Image (tube, grey):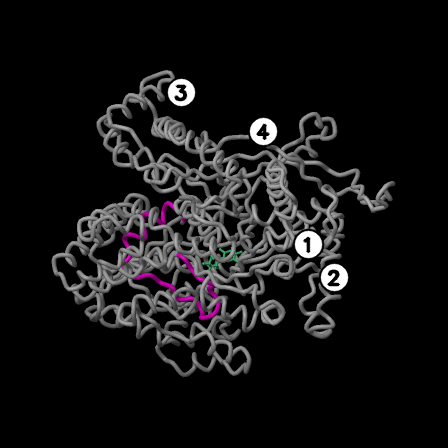
């Protein structure tokens, strides 16, 4: 982008004065940020218009990524980076006596997602634009994002996240692109004269206006600017009389008021399904409006449009597309069904039963009567067609409607042409087990797309030190072609390079140490081993196993203050769903143990525990570059993929892992010597579940080391956790330890011991870190997205 420092400074000053009517020097950080953001938006607006015009003109096939969640992180620096003006702006700001990083921190991190699923959607949006694909995001503009987490007396407290309190400089409200989404009402059929076909009348509906807010997705140095469209619910213009009471108006606003804070857990709430239909319908309607303006035959719809549904949350896009094609455009069932199946593809993100969406039939019948009829019809035709081929039993097991419930995964699979898992192991389990009935019916629909991450945000922006070091050592090709980072392997025995890498890590650890001191008053030694577990709090992710290891070290040091143990800082970041009582108990336990150990002088600072408040994208950018060990210790078979594993690897952390999710592929890429693997394998876990011989009480009784640790939970050693300690103890010892922590405990300790040994040999550790960085290229979401484009969406990068 043609732009020089002097010009930037002039433009920035002008922009600030235009917005705030005084000089930038006197402005607050927020104002300085808003002026910069506003200026940046102006700089890409021409490319944004141009990109959309090109797609329209060439009638390029476009993909629409439907996702209930997006977690983009702060956008200022990623936009500057992708526009190629980050260095120029940094320099200009400095000359204006401003610190770009400080100004950038004034941006509110939009928390419109819970965890992995939402962050994946944002990595994908970046990669779609950066690989030059015609793609759009479709989601919800929540008025309040994921709750802000506070710890009070060690307990998690949730506060509302008013992310729009300042101006959102990136979004553009497009009132003229608003559509009506209809709920409730009565459906009847009338015989039209002439063709004699049945026409649908859908009357007395509650109509809600969906207003889009568009945000640019700037591609990396390629002039492409795609669109992320987030919908907001409003009262239709001119319809104010029908929403005369405050309560009626509140009901409308409620639809896009707040993000449900559950990750990988389903809560069958009416408001949630309203949200799902709201953004699915609005998205499909705006796609239909676009397609009609191309003036092509309906049969060409799948050649121009791909709709991808991120998990089952947007599955109602399937019957909604059917509804419009049938009722509004007059296509036959068979025509509409062919088009719908060819257009839609679906990603499964979990095998956890508690995450599977199932809606009560009566709820859908009342809320969406026409959609309900269409789902019934899809189901009937499915059963009619499959029963003669596969028999009654298997066919019934794949029914969309059963026992008064509508199973969204079944609808998503039957109504789409592609079903993908998010890591090799996960997809294998889907095919062999969880979705095996469907795999038997539709083997050609199933495929794997291992997740990825964008190194632009997770290395270039989050880890400037490493970026500079890489540029110096292997050139800059890795930035546009992440695989090229493998060149670094050539330097694995270069002492000079290894030392530089250690310096990079150390400076990142110092940066985190400053944060821990400033924000939490905890002093940590930046030369200690930083052991990091950052992810949603969930029993299957086994933060508790990490805790058991910490308690083991604590006891070792209590027994022998001179025990030969590496100094470690254990860093946790995790939110618990507000209704997930057990997860909240674990948070309280970790905070209590942190208090106990951090303040025990006899431990001699050999263990510190830092549980950061309000973990999210921005804190991840601070923590990940500082990590030495990446904890990926879920029970094998449970974590579909994981993506923090990839981010941490890219930043030179060594993975401590079970063979779960994408950890398996990480091991394959980095090699056995550069990762710590332990624990049950997925098939061993399956076998235990099948034969039911696991007995955790037995392990407790027979393993004195473990018994002593577990007893700490109930003997008063840990202050302030009487009920939590007892409940957690019971879950592990009395209620048979659903996630096999006790079974994996010994292997975990052994792996942790090996990590200690490796860390004490600085060259060895640095070489392992180097090999991880050098092997992380294949986990770029650019490659993942190119595989989606090629194999599922059938779209090609623009030249
Ligand atoms: C979510 O964040 C994930 C799966 C879900 O079903 C829901 Cl509702 C939310 C996560 C997986 O747990 C994680 O393993 C995966 O890496 C991520 O989605 C992205 O695929």
Is the residue marked by circle 2 packed among few (<14), some (14-19), or many (20+) residues within 10 Å? few
Of residue 6 and residue 208, the one placed in the foreground of this image is: 6
Q: Counting residues from the N terminus, which is met first, the one under dot 2 or under dot 3? A: 3
Do callouts 4 and 2 mark residues in contact (Cβ within 8 Å)?
no
Percent coordinates x, y for residue 722 in the rendering: 46, 63
- Which quarter of the image is occupied by the N terminus? top left
Label 4 SS: helix
Q: Mark 1 points at which residue?
A: 337
As helix, strand or loop, the secondary structure at mark 2 comes to helix
Label whose residue precedes the other's in the sequence (4 or 2): 4
Q: How far apart are marks 2 and 1 (CA)?
A: 11 Å
Mark 3 sits near ligand 1, with its Cβ under 8 Å away: no
Q: Does the magenta stretch include residue 389?
A: no
Inter-mark Cα distance, 4 to 2: 40 Å
Q: Nearer the viewer, mark 4 or mark 2?
A: 2
Eyeballing the image, is 726 above or below 221?
A: below
Q: Where is residue 597 in the image (x, y as percent from the top left)?
A: 31, 60
Indicate which disc, 2 or 1, sits on the residue closer to the N terminus. Answer: 1
Would you identify the image quadrant in which residue 497 lies? Answer: bottom left
Q: Which range is magenta?
A: 616-643
Q: Where is residue 44 in the image (x, y as percent from the top left)?
A: 39, 32
Residue at the (83%, 46%) spot, across then down: 197
Q: Say which residue label 3 marks.
A: 19
Residue that carries the numbered disc 4 in the rendered image = 175
Camera-side mark, 2 or 1: 1
**Residue underneath mark 2:** 381
Asked if ligand 1 lies within 8 A of label 2, the reply is: no
- Give the foreground label among 3 and 1: 1
> Nearer the N terminus, badge 3 or badge 1?
3
State yes or no: discs 2 and 1 in contact (Cβ < 8 Å). Answer: yes
């Amino acid at each position: 982008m043609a732009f020089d420092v002097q010009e930037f400074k002039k433009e920035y000053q002008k922009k600030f004065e235009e917005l705030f009517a005084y000089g930038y020097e006197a402005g607050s950080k927020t104002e300085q940020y808003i002026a910069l953001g506003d200026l940046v938006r102006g700089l890409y607006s021409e490319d944004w218009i141009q990109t959309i015009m090109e797609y329209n003109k060439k009638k390029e096939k476009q993909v629409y990524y439907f996702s209930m969640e997006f977690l983009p992180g702060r956008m200022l620096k990623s936009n500057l980076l992708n526009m190629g003006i980050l260095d120029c702006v940094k320099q200009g700001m400095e000359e204006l006596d401003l610190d770009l990083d400080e100004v950038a921190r004034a941006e509110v991190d939009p928390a419109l997602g819970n965890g992995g699923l939402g962050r994946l959607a944002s990595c994908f949006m970046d990669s779609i634009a950066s690989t030059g694909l015609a793609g759009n995001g479709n989601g919800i503009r929540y008025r309040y994002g994921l709750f802000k987490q506070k710890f009070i007396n060690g307990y998690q407290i949730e506060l509302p996240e008013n992310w729009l309190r300042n101006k959102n400089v990136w979004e553009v409200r497009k009132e003229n692109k608003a559509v009506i989404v209809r709920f409730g009402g009565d459906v009847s059929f009338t015989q039209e004269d002439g063709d004699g076909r049945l026409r649908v009348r859908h009357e007395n509906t509650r109509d809600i206006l969906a207003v889009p807010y568009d945000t640019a997705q700037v591609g990396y140095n390629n002039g492409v600017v795609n669109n992320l469209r987030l919908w907001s619910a409003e009262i239709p213009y001119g319809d104010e009389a029908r929403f005369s009471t405050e309560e009626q108006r509140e009901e409308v606003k409620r639809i896009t008021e707040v993000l449900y804070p559950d990750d990988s857990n389903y809560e069958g709430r009416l408001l949630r399904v309203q949200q799902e239909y709201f953004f699915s319908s609005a998205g499909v309607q705006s796609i239909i409006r676009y397609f009609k303006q191309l003036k092509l035959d309906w049969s060409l719809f799948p050649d121009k449009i791909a709709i991808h549904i991120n998990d089952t949350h947007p599955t109602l896009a399937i019957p909604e597309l059917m509804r419009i094609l049938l009722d509004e455009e007059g296509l036959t069932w068979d025509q509409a069904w062919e088009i719908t199946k060819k257009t839609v593809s679906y990603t499964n993100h979990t095998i956890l039963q508690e995450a599977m969406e199932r809606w009560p039939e009566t709820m859908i019948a009342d809320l969406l009567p026409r959609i309900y009829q269409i789902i019934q019809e899809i189901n009937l035709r499915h059963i009619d067609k499959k029963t003669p081929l596969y028999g009654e039993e298997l066919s019934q097991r794949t029914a969309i409607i059963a026992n008064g419930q509508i199973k969204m995964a079944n609808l998503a699979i039957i109504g789409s042409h592609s079903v993908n898992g998010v890591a090799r192991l996960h997809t294998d389990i889907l095919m062999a087990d969880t979705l095996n009935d469907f795999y038997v019916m539709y083997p050609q629909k199933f495929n794997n797309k291992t997740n990825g991450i964008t190194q632009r945000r997770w290395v270039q922006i989050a880890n400037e030190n490493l970026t500079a070091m890489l540029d110096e050592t292997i050139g800059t090709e890795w930035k546009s072609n992440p695989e090229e980072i493998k060149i670094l392997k050539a330097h694995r025995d270069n002492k000079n390079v290894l030392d530089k890498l250690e310096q990079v890590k150390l400076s990142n650890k110092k940066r985190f140490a400053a944060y821990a001191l400033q924000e939490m008053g905890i002093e940590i030694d930046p030369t200690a081993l930083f052991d990091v577990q950052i992810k949603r709090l969930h029993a299957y992710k086994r933060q508790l196993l990490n805790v058991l290891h910490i308690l083991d070290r604590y006891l070792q040091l209590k027994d022998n203050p001179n025990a030969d143990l590496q100094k470690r800082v254990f860093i946790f970041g995790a939110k618990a769903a507000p209704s997930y009582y057990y997860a909240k108990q674990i948070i309280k336990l970790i905070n209590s143990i942190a208090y106990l150990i951090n303040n025990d002088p006899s431990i001699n600072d050999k263990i510190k525990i830092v549980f950061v408040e309000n973990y999210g994208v921005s804190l991840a950018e601070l923590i990940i570059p500082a990590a030495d060990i990446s904890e990926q210790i879920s029970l094998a078979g449970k974590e579909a993929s994981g993506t923090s594993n990839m981010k941490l690897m890219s930043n030179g952390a060594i993975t401590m892992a079970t063979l779960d999710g994408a950890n398996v592929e990480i091991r394959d890429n980095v090699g056995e010597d550069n990762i710590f693997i332990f624990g049950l394998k997925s098939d061993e876990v399956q076998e235990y579940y099948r034969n039911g011989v696991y007995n955790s009480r037995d392990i407790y009784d027979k393993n004195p080391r473990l018994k002593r640790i577990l007893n700490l939970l109930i003997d008063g050693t840990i202050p302030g956790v009487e009920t939590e300690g007892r409940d957690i103890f019971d879950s592990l010892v009395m209620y048979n330890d659903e996630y096999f922590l006790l079974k994996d405990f010994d292997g975990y300790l052994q792996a942790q011991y090996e990590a200690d040994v490796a860390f004490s040999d600085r060259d060895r550790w640095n070489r392992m870190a180097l090999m991880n960085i050098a092997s992380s290229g294949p986990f770029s979401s650019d490659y993942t997205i190119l595989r989606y484009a090629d194999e599922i969406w059938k779209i090609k990068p623009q030249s």
